[in-house]
């Protein structure tokens, strides 16, 4: 690791460069750099195709961010989350711009970032979790100064916490009151599926029952819960089936009916697709444990 502190007349920079172990590079999400920057209007940072993901939390002042051909203005309380394989730049607006930041990569960050974008996450947004995000960035900086043998794992834990918060944010970055009402509707639909999975349920039935457009319903449910309605219903049914297979001697044909799938052959195909084994094999493996 390397500590860098400096004042150039244009900016005051406090950062740490972190070198993870080979184990961390192979298996974990790992930190590359972290720090805090106080810059004035003469400062500009620009990069292209950097194999990294960048999170910035703006503490004070304002700045301009250019990313994938779009311009964003950010202020205190805003967050920036970028895939740095794309060209980006940022520069202060006004005399002072203060922010905390971290670069990281590894593991399945690309898939997590793609899911963040798919669920509506934006490169720049105002965050309700401002203090929590800022605290994690501070903790990353502090942890990176420690030579503990557990350091990579502790940094990984903090980075996962950071990504969880950002993933939650992606589900809140939609359109105001209408979206909030949609979230309440999705909770009602989810509860209905939890309680009535034994019944024959279709998207058209749900749309009619909850007075909501079918296509809007499928989009918002997936955004809120990260899974489609059809797959969620399957998940609920298979979970119930697993419970019965483990803790009862009820025949598989009866279990399929009680899980809302009257065709036992279809039930077995779905079960194998989800669990990688047949219902009978699952029962044999797990009963008595």
Image (cartoon, rainbow, N blue to C red):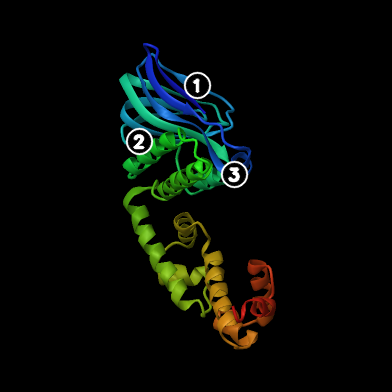
Q: What element carries label 1?
A: strand
Upstream in sequence: badge 3 or badge 2: 2
Q: Mark 1 points at which residue?
A: 46
Residue 188, relative to residue 113: is it above or below? below
Residue that appears at 65% across and 71% down: 270
Between 47 and 7, which is closer to the camera in this rendering? 7
From this viewpoint, is residue 272 visible?
A: yes
* For discs 3 and 2, the disc positioned in front in the rendered view: 3
Labels 3 and 2 touching (C-beta < 8 A): no
| Circle nearer the N terminus (1, 3) | 1
- Tell me if residue 287 comes above or below residue 137 in the rendering: below
Alpha-carbon neighbours of circle 3 within 10 Å: few (<14), some, or many (≥20)? some
- Looking at the rendered structure, the secondary structure element under dot 2 is strand
Query: Along the line of sight, which residue is nearer the eye, 120 or 91?
Result: 91
Work out whether residue 80 can be spotted. Answer: no
Q: Distance between the residues labelled 3 and 2?
A: 26 Å
Residue 142's disc is none
Residue drawn at point x = 56 percent, y = 30 percent: 86
Q: Distance between the residues labelled 1 and 3?
A: 25 Å
Q: Mark 2 points at which residue?
A: 78
Residue 153: image location, x then y, percent = 52, 45
Secondary structure, mark 3, is loop
First along the sequence among labels 2 and 1: 1
């Amino acid at each position: 690791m390397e500590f860098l502190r400096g004042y150039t007349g244009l900016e005051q920079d406090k950062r740490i460069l972190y070198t993870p172990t080979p184990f961390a590079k192979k298996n974990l999400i790992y930190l590359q750099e972290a720090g805090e920057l106080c810059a004035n209007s003469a400062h500009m940072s620009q990069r292209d195709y950097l194999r990294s993901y960048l999170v910035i939390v703006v503490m004070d002042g304002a700045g301009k961010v250019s990313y994938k051909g779009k311009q964003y203005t950010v202020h205190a309380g805003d967050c920036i989350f970028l895939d740095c394989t794309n060209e980006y730049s940022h520069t202060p607006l006004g005399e002072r711009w203060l922010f905390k930041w971290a670069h990281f990569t590894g593991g399945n960050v690309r898939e997590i970032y793609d899911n963040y974008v798919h669920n509506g996450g934006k490169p720049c947004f105002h965050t309700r979790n401002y203090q929590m995000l800022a605290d994690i960035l501070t903790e990353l900086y502090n942890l990176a100064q420690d030579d503990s043998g557990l350091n990579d794992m502790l940094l990984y834990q903090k980075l996962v916490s950071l990504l969880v918060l950002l993933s939650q944010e992606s589900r809140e970055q939609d359109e105001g009151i209408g979206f909030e009402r949609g979230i309440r509707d999705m909770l009602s639909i989810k509860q209905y599926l939890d309680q009535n999975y034994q019944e024959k349920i279709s998207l058209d039935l749900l749309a009619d029952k909850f007075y909501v457009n079918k296509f809007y319903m499928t989009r918002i449910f997936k955004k809120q819960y990260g899974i489609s309605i059809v797959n969620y219903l399957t998940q609920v049914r298979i979970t119930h089936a697993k419970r019965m297979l483990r803790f009862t001697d009820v025949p598989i044909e009866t279990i399929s009916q009680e899980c809302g799938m009257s065709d036992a052959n279809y039930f077995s195909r779905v079960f194998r697709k989800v669990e990688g084994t047949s219902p009978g094999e699952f029962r044999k493996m797990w009963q008595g444990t």
